[in-house]
Image (tube, rainbow, N blue to C red):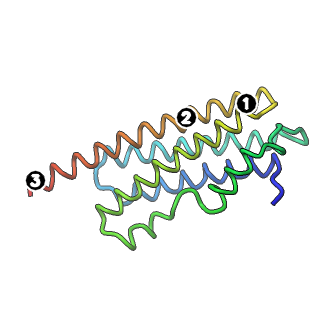
Amino acid sequence: MKITDTGILEISLKIEREGGEFYNKLAEHVADPKIKEFLLHLAKDEAQHEKQFKKMLREKGSSLYGWEKKKAIHKLIESQFQTDIFPKVNEIFARLPNFQGIQKAIDFAIEAERTSAEFYSLLGEFCDNIKAKTLLVMMEKAERDHLTQVLALKKQYLHDSRKKSKSS
């Protein structure tokens, strides 16, 4: 498969779009208002990231970013991005009870945020365009921040769930 700079930016768009949809759908399955608000905040962040990649794609024109011959990027794309990075939330809940479904969805979010950060880091490392490189560094940081936040969410959710089960 021939991977182009434009194709790589389109993968980035897809990651952010799917992330926003994932967090919006997951919020529908959560009763706790604080967790719901947090998930909706993540969804808004992902929508903002999507806009940034759309702008980057529009402004790119025919210039090359230096990714077209980088094997590390191609390997990562072939191993991680041939399918959706974020699973469909409804499919998770169709197979698992609510608690396990939320736990599984959070685990997927952790892995997706980790993979996204790694992807943007690699793109930034090999990018020849300073403006694009700057945006990619910011996106990597945002995804690493999301990872930290989702890890904290998991810890809080598991803590709250244990507390509820002890009081029942």
Crowd band around label 1 with a 10 angstrom C-alpha radius: few (<14), some (14–19), many (20+):
some
Q: Amino acid at mark 1?
A: Lys
Q: Which residue is mark 1?
A: 133
Q: Amino acid at mark 3?
A: Lys
Q: Secondary structure at mark 1?
A: helix
Gap between marks 3 and 1 measured at Cα: 49 Å
Q: Position of residue 113 (x, y in %)?
A: 52, 45
- In depth, the one of 79 and 65 nearer the eye is 79
Q: Which residue is mark 3?
A: 166
Q: Position of residue 132 (x, y in %)?
A: 75, 32
Crowd band around label 2 with a 10 angstrom C-alpha radius: few (<14), some (14–19), many (20+):
some
Identify the residue at horizontal 30%, vertical 65% (top origin): 98
Q: Position of residue 52 (x, y in %)?
A: 68, 39
- Quadrant in the picture for residue 102: bottom left
Mark 2 vs mark 1: which is more N-terminal?
1
Identify the residue at horizontal 48%, vertical 34% (top origin): 145
The answer to whether marks 3 and 1 mark residues whose Cβ atoms lie closer than 8 Å is no
Q: Which residue is mark 2?
A: 142
